[in-house]
Amino acid sequence: MLSPIQIQKHTTYAHTRYSHIWNMYMGALELGLLPNPASIPANKLIPPSLDCHYTKTQYLGRFHAREWKVEINLAYYVVMQDKEQLDDTIAHELAHSLQWKLCPQFKDWHGKEFRQIMAAIGYKGRATVSTPYRTKDKVAAVAKAAKDIQLLSLL
Ligand SMILES: [Zn+2]
């Protein structure tokens, strides 16, 4: 079972990567590498707040435009320990937020603009996460981790 210290470590790590990836996007925006039909300068953008969750629900990340918030499901990270996947998820959700601000006319959540934004910092811009994350064993392990962590939070 995970200790509260381990959970805190994962959460801190996710926040560090989140700031880093946001800064990479802002650098790309300043260099004119992001689609920006709304012509918004980098200093007018505020990163969405980050909520780290641990849930058995099968999502790795979510973007909420109205609340200007990104949720990352760290239960997956706890189980897989896959740093590249965590970065990919963060880059994916932040790309949604940038598409929302910079390309308000976008038609498809995972369309042309979304892929351009992801590509500007070297990501592929897939619509969904690769299948190794969805095997029966992995899903069960994620559910167990999420449950353990909820029990821990009651102590
Ligand atoms: Zn998406």
Image (cartoon, rainbow, N blue to C red):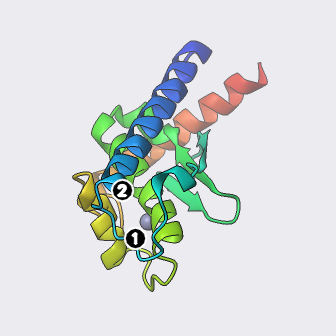
Say what secondary structure mark 1 lies in: loop
Q: Quadrant of residue 84?
A: top left
Tell me: residue 85, above or below residue 32. Answer: above
Q: Amino acid at mark 2?
A: Leu
Q: How crowded is the residue under tag 1: few (<14 C-alpha within 10 Å), some, or many (20+)?
A: some
The amino acid type of the residue labelled 1 equals: Asn
Residue 68 image point, x, y percent:
65, 57
Element at badge 2? Answer: helix
Residue 104 position in % (x across, y down): 52, 78
Residue 154, position as x, y percentages in the image: 77, 25
Query: Mark 1 highlights which residue?
Result: 36
In the figure, is residue 151 to the left or right of 90? right
Q: Tell whether label 2 touches label 1 (CB within 8 Å).
A: yes
34 vs 150, nearest the viewer: 34
Labelled disc at residue 29: 2
| Identity of the residue drawn at 56% across and 55% down | 44
Q: Residue at x 69, y 65 (%)?
A: 66
Residue 136 visible at all: no
